Image: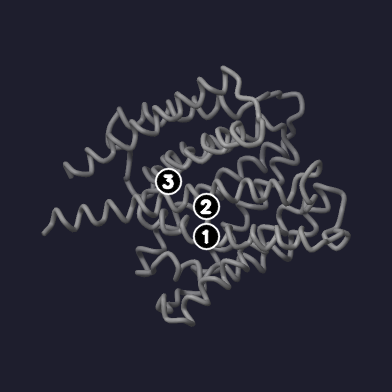
Amino acid sequence: MQIAIQERRRANDALAWIFNVASSVLIVFSNKMLMDPKWGYKFVFATTLCALHFFASAVAVKSFEAMGFSPKASMPFSEKLYFSCVAATSIVSLNLSLLMNTVGFYQVSKLLIIPFICLVEYVSYKRGLKSVSLFLCILLVLVGVGIVTVTDVSVSGLSVLGISIAALSVVSSGMQQILCGQIQRSNNLSSTQLLSNTAPVQGLMLLIVGPTLDWLITGKWVTQYEASIPSMQCLAVSCAIAALVNISQFMCLGRFQAVTFQVLGHTKTVLVLLMGWMFMNDVITYKKLIGMMLAVTGMVSYGYLNSLISVKT
């Protein structure tokens, strides 16, 4: 009986992960079509788009509740506001970091999210890595993804403000992922129930700051966008896929530790690069190929070793 329950749980975990990876890869290409200034629909307002994505997610989960597919549940307003503020800060600071820093430094700062999560979980919850082997796997993933994504790490263009914004993006992104699983467990909420409580608040927060932030980045206001029927159709598809991404991400963060989610999440980076090469004529150099091989080796090894340790405990 116990074995059957464990097998069912592993199957559900695998389905949640596949759901998240597939939707996350799809959203990259739908957003590229929507936002690309050369051959896409030139909707370059990233933060406003994030606000629309959260509103779409809220509509989706509220509809599930209205149809009886998902039971309603509430959470303390203070926790709802706290989580929404952290999540909104993560999105805004990531966009500002990309604006104020080089692409290379931006990518390096994103790689620091895993060490930050490890540090917080060890200090706050006494939850460290279970073996040296897992640490080496994480290091291999970081090196591989770094080789793939980091172009230049020039210090000449850095400023104190830019570094501060990058640090804020690391802290807020890491805390969002930790809080997601923690709040679900402490309030006994499902992934859709947590999303139902927080998505409308996050959407409202981002809609308030989004147009101004997008103007700072692009020099244009979202109200100046020349919409068309095809661009609005693409926007609708982007919002629909984003709802799937948010639902699946909350599912995964409720099931996996934040570190595991981050490590295996780099699967999306590798898949996006491969699909760009296969369908969009992107070039994969030997450097990128080596980086992808290292990252995949690290991810597979981490997943295998972590499953062995989980079985023993």
In the rendering, at what x and y percent does residue 190 appear? 39, 67
User: Which amino acid is tagged 1?
Assistant: Leu
Q: Furthest-top residue in view? A: 286
From mark 3 to mark 2, how far is it between C-alphas? 15 Å
Q: Which residue is mark 2?
A: 23
144 vs 211, left or right, is: left
Quarter of the image with the C terminus in it: top left
112 vs 121, left or right, is: right
In the rendering, at what x and y percent does residue 176 appear? 51, 54
Q: Above or below — where is 223 with respect to 249? A: below
Asked if labels 2 and 3 touch by Cβ distance under 8 angstroms, the answer is no
In the rendering, at what x and y percent does residue 265 appear? 47, 42
Instruction: Identify the residue shown where x is 72% and y is 35%.
Output: 101
41 vs 141, left or right, is: right
- Residue 1's disc number: none
In front here: 206 or 295?
A: 295
| Numbered disc 1: secondary structure | helix
In front here: 125 or 187?
A: 187
Asked if labels 1 and 2 touch by Cβ distance under 8 angstroms, the answer is yes
Q: Which residue is mark 3?
A: 261
Quarter of the image with the N terminus in it: bottom left
In front here: 270 or 215?
A: 270
Discs 3/2, front: 2
Could you classify mark 1 by the number of other residues whose Cα lies within 10 Å: few (under 14), some (14-19), or many (20 or more)?
many
From mark 2 to mark 1, how far is it between C-alphas? 6 Å
